Amino acid sequence: MKRLRRLKEMFTQSIQAKLTSYFILILLPLIFFSLYANDRSHNILEQELGERTMSAMGSALEYVDLTMDGIKNLTTLLATDSSLTSRLKHSGDQLSEEALLDFTQVMLQITNTTNINTSVSGVTIYHGGSKRLISSRIGALYRPEAASEPWFKDVMRSNGSYVLYLPEKHEEALMGWADPVYDQEQIVLMQLMDLYSRDRGSNVLMLSIPKRQMLSYLRSLAPSEASKVYLFDERDRLIVTNAPAAEVKALNSEDWQAIQSGRNGPDGKNMVLRAESPRSGWSLVLMQPEGEIYKKSRPLELFSYWIIGISCVLAFWISWLVYSNIAAPISSLVSGMKQLRRGNFDAQLKNNRQDELGYLTDAFNQTVEQQRHLIRDIYEQQLRLTKTELKFLQSQINPHFLYNTLDSIYWSAKNYDADEISEMVLNLSRFFRLSLSKGRDTFTVEENFAHLKYYIRVQQLRFVDQFTASFHAAADTEGLHVLKLLLQPLVENAILHGLEKRESGGKLHISAELREERLLLTVADNGKGIPEEQLHRIRISLSRMGGRDGEVPGGEFFALLNVKSRIKLYYGDTAEFTIESEEGKGTVSRIELPLDRCINQGEEEES
């Protein structure tokens, strides 16, 4: 989610990102069309190749069916040949001369059959009476254990049906000839002899079919040496394959199931086709590597990918060119605008263009130059006027305070001894000394509090200590600068209009603290408070008095309006002055000043 938000911001705030995205959107149809064309060509190639291959596989299965049908017919013909069955009536382990003569005739007949039928590599008869194999390849061989072999049991259970035996074990060659039953290079078709006789015995006719003969025809289906052909019977037993024996042996049951079902091969990178004979149930599977299928179309596919890649690179390159020639000058103008907004009126942009963007850059530089002249000629003049106005407002405070102080000295001289008068005059002189402050406009919070202490002490002497005063300045506020005499009118109002009416127990608390990048100055008393109606009129007067229009406050609530006028003139519109009061409980006056202005005032005073 965060990454999506970041991409959205990049798109909305960056012209280069937008240009690149638009160029990519233009290329998307080309990319999709190229990918669709490649996929479609693959499908067409697979479809045409599959149709041709399936047709050839169907023909191959017909050939296999015809070959097996011919061999089955030959097997039936031999198994029911009376000239053969009559010569196999002998029994016993010891053969008579007549039996030897009959077996010789049998061997001659099956040898002739082998010579005539090229699809059969050998004919063998197992004579159950003598427990001998009579083969066209090895003659007569005594085989007493044959009756316990699985193939013999399968033939006896078949009750005259054909049994296709696939030799799995290998025995040593006999007299230079391969074993007629266990030759792994052969498949053997078996059937009981003398089918139409009730007393047909246990003679078994076996016709050997060389795998190489079937494989030589099936191999023509494989377009390359890497292609694999598998022939399965109706029981899904592997008859022949051109795959190496080691590879066939390494296949597990899942691999065989995948191959037999016509799904993808074991390595997952082959096209597999499967055809099944509806007559015999035999199936033929062709497995061809995809790399060979698409070998001729691969260069064209790679060429299309190269086109897509080069197009994307060109899109990024063109978007960068457009950005560097159009968006970069605009970004430079945006940067200049930001500097101008931060008050840097010396910002000038380099310009070496003659087009519309060059005209905009020149216009920006001229605008900055005009702004600089306006500030010097008009703003600085207005600033001097504002400072003069501020000094005039300050000059109205001192006579007002001086009259009250002289009056206090007068009443003190009548009611108290000379020592108290001396202390009052001392504090008064210190107060005026700080007020002059060699022309400084601001004091630190610490100096302002010291200044107020002199004034408050004079008032305490006047009112015979009927109130106490406390100060609290947070450590991070003592060095901040505020206008001198800013709090004095508020303290004066708190004493004369609030605490004067109390006979004793009066409390005056003055504090300074930082709150959310603002300096908060508070003057609180527990005097009689301000009536609700009067408080309402005070707030209306304060809300109407902006303090930045040059109007000098006067009349009712002069001191309060003076305070607000001064902070608005000096600290700007963000400065606030509020009063809260409850009749009979006291009044709280608060001044909120922007912290950066309080810091900058100190730097200006020092400079």
Image (tube, rainbow, N blue to C red):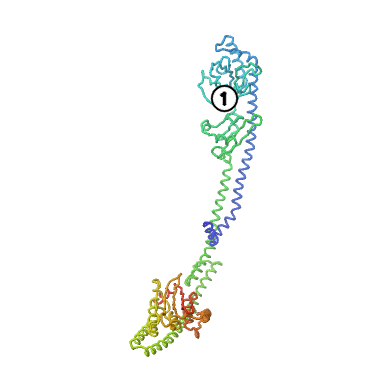
Whether 381 is drawn above or below 298: the answer is below
Residue 606 x, y percent position in the rendering: 39, 76
Q: Position of residue 294 (x, y in %)?
A: 58, 41
Number of marks present in the image shown: 1
Looking at the image, residue 395 sits to the left or right of residue 214; the answer is: left
Q: Position of residue 479 (x, y in %)?
A: 39, 74
Question: In this rendering, is residue 470 above or below 298?
Answer: below
- Residue 72: image quadrant is top right
| Figure quadrant of residue 230 | top right
Compared across the picture, whether 471 is left or right of 28 comes to: left
Q: Nearer the viewer, residue 195 or 405?
A: 405
Q: In the rendering, at what x and y percent does residue 309 appear?
A: 55, 51
Label 1 CA crowd tier, 10 Å (few <14, some 14–19, many 20+)? many
Quarter of the image that includes the C terminus: bottom left
Amino acid tagged 1: Gln
Q: Nearer the viewer, residue 583 or 117?
A: 583
Q: Is residue 412 visible?
A: yes
Q: In this view of the protein, which residue sits in the foreground, 326 or 338? A: 338
The quadrant in which residue 166 appears is top right
**Direction left: furthest residue:** 419
- Residue 579: tell me if it is visible: no
- Residue occupied by mark 1: 186
Q: Of helix, strand and loop, which one carries label 1?
A: strand
367 vs 475, nearest the viewer: 475
The residue under the point 57% across, 50% down is 308
Q: In the drawing, does residue 341 fall left or right of residue 59?
A: left
